[in-house]
Image (tube, grey):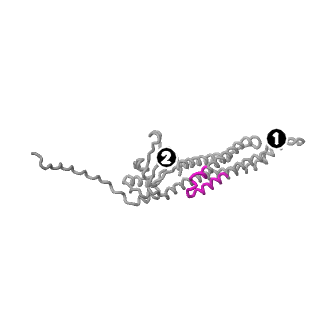
């Protein structure tokens, strides 16, 4: 399962959701005058909605062709993302419809009298309610698109976490018992939580674990717990911001066992006396 690729998809979906939210705010707060001004202001919004729709389709195709489809619950995410494509398409259609009822300033057919100021003002006044309705519908569809992207991003993370908890590898099942250090680290994460951080100040690729109660956990200990499926981390967040560490169902089961006894050092054997050599000269 390409967890890193899917984590990047989750991050991009959340970014896409924020773009839908920004476009929603622009459409909702749009102020315009029917005619040339409306055309100039609504056209970029329509082009942006079409661009976001294309991005949604790229993500849908990427997820559909990935190993994510073998994870339980993935169908719901794919269906939701396809509904986002519908909503964003409808938003673009509503923006185009607002332009279609716009009161343009062109001249009428030859033989018809040209519009005077009062006639032009009446046409613009009649266009405003129709344009307002289409723009309100577009804003609603953009809000649904943003919500859908957030839902899919959360769904992917949830599905992966559930699959990670339910799948116990043969190596994990036959792994040796926890050491006292591993047990204490797992308990600290269960009680106070923790985050996994990466910082360039520590060197290339250097990561550290920070716990809520200040317990120090080495990367070797965290790696052992993670490898056995006792802990998981939020792959949708970048390491530079801190990935939340959670104790899995398997980890909580491990904590139900007594704390391992301290390892006692074996006493050193006394040095053996040199053998007596029979017949040695005195």
Q: Quadrant of the C terminus?
A: top left
Report the side of 146 relative to 220 (left or right).
Answer: right
Report the side of 204 relative to 111 (left or right).
Answer: left
**Magenta stretch in the rendered image:** 62-85
The correct choice, above or below, for 232 with respect to 199 in the image is below
Looking at the rendered structure, the secondary structure element under dot 1 is: loop
Q: How many numbered circles are shown?
A: 2
Do the numbered discs 2 and 1 sit on residues whose CB atoms are within 8 Å? Answer: no
Report the disc number at residue 274. none
Furthest residue in direction left, as rendered: 282
Report the side of 180 relative to 64 (left or right).
Answer: left
Q: Residues within 10 Å of mark 2 (few under 14, many from 20)?
A: many
Looking at the rendered structure, the secondary structure element under dot 2 is: loop
Residue at point 55%, 49% (across, down): 6
Residue at point 44%, 45% (across, down): 208
In the image, which is nearer the foreground, mark 2 or mark 1? 2
- Give the percent coordinates (x, y) of residue 241: 50, 45
In the image, residue 80 lies in the stretch drawn in magenta: yes
- Give the percent coordinates (x, y) of residue 181: 37, 52
Residue in the foreground of this view, choosing between 167 and 200:
167
In the image, residue 261 lies in the stretch drawn in magenta: no
Furthest residue in direction right, as rendered: 111
Residue at point 45%, 50% (across, down): 194
Residue at point 20%, 50% (across, down): 272
Say which label, 2 or 1, has the lower sequence index: 1
- Give the percent coordinates (x, y) of residue 220: 41, 48
Q: CA distance from mark 2 to mark 1?
A: 58 Å
Q: What secondary structure is the stretch in magenta mostly built from?
A: helix
- Give the percent coordinates (x, y) of residue 91: 69, 50
Report the side of 31 relative to 76 (left or right).
Answer: right
Which residue, given by chain and number where applicable, does mark 2 sit on? 242
Which residue, given by chain and number where applicable, does mark 1 sit on? 106
């Amino acid at each position: 399962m390409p967890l890193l690729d899917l984590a990047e998809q989750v991050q991009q979906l959340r970014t896409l959701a924020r773009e839908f939210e920004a476009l929603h705010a622009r459409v909702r707060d749009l102020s315009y005058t029917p005619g040339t001004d409306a055309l100039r202001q609504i056209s970029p919004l329509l082009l942006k909605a079409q661009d976001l729709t294309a991005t949604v389709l790229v993500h849908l195709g990427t997820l559909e062709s990935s190993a994510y489809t073998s994870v339980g619950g993935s169908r719901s995410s794919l269906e939701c993302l396809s509904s986002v494509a519908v909503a964003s398409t409808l938003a673009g259609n509503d923006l185009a419809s607002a332009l279609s009822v716009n009161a343009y300033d062109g001249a009428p057919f030859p033989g018809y009298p040209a519009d005077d100021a009062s006639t032009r003002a009446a046409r613009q006044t009649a266009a405003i309610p129709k344009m307002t309705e289409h723009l309100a519908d577009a804003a609603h569809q953009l809000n649904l698109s943003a919500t859908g992207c957030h839902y899919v991003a959360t769904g992917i993370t949830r599905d992966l976490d559930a699959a990670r908890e339910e799948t116990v590898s043969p190596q994990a099942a036959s792994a040796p018992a926890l050491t006292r250090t591993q047990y204490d680290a797992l308990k600290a994460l269960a009680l106070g939580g923790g985050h996994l951080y990466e910082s360039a100040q520590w060197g290339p690729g250097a990561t550290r674990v920070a716990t809520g109660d200040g317990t120090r956990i080495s990367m070797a200990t965290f790696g052992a717990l993670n490898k056995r499926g006792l802990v998981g981390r939020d792959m949708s967040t970048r390491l530079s911001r801190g990935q939340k560490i959670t104790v899995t169902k398997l980890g909580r089961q491990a904590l139900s066992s007594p704390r391992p006894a301290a390892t006692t050092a074996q006493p050193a054997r006394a040095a053996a006396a040199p053998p007596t050599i029979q017949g040695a000269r005195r």
